[in-house]
Amino acid sequence: MRSTEDDKLREVVGTFFDDVLMPMAKRMRASGIQPFPVQPDVSRLSYYARRSTCSMTRDDFTAPSCIDFEDFERRLAAHWTALGRSELAGEAARIADLARAAHAAFAGNEQDAEISPYIYVMF
């Protein structure tokens, strides 16, 4: 990633953090809700969860994930809504925009990247 793209992305993410996430966390704390767990939940006997399957299947590799940014936005909003985090769900579009910006900043570098002369490359 070029330095200017990195700086631009950091600025956009920093602004989102300062303008959205920090005020949201302050509102939650003021209403008696912890935004994120800060200590273990003493009511849980264990955080260990036995998996229903212990090996991956073909579907694990071929199942669609987020197909595009709109799908990412929709799934993220649905996930946060299911968790009862409606305020975060309302920011899903803005987070999808951040994902687009990050993708744009990183995507162009794959073709432009130079391989270090100290790395042996096999083709």
Image: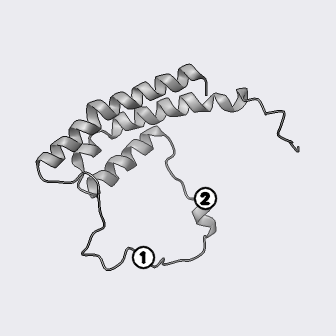
Picture layout, residue 1 above or below residue 118: above
Picture layout, residue 71 above or below residue 62: above
Q: Is 87 placed left or right of 71 in the picture?
A: left
Query: Who is closer to the viewer here, 2 or 80?
Result: 2
Looking at the image, which residue is at 35% across and 36% down? 93
Residue 117 occupies quadrant:
top right
Picture layout, residue 108 above or below residue 73: above
Q: Secondary structure at mark 2?
A: helix
Q: Which residue is mark 2?
A: 62
Measured from the top left, where is residue 119 in percent x and y?
82, 40
Mark 2 vs 1: CB contact within 8 A: no
Separation of marks 2 and 1 at Cα, in angstroms: 25 Å
Colour scheme of the picture: one colour
Mark 2 vs 1, N-terminal side = 1
Q: Amino acid type of disc 1?
A: Ala
Looking at the image, which residue is at 39% across and 49% down? 75
Q: Is 7 placed left or right of 41 in the picture?
A: right
**Of circles 2 and 1, which is in front?**
1
Looking at the image, which residue is at 26% across and 73% down? 42
Q: Which residue is mark 1?
A: 49
Q: Secondary structure at mark 1?
A: loop
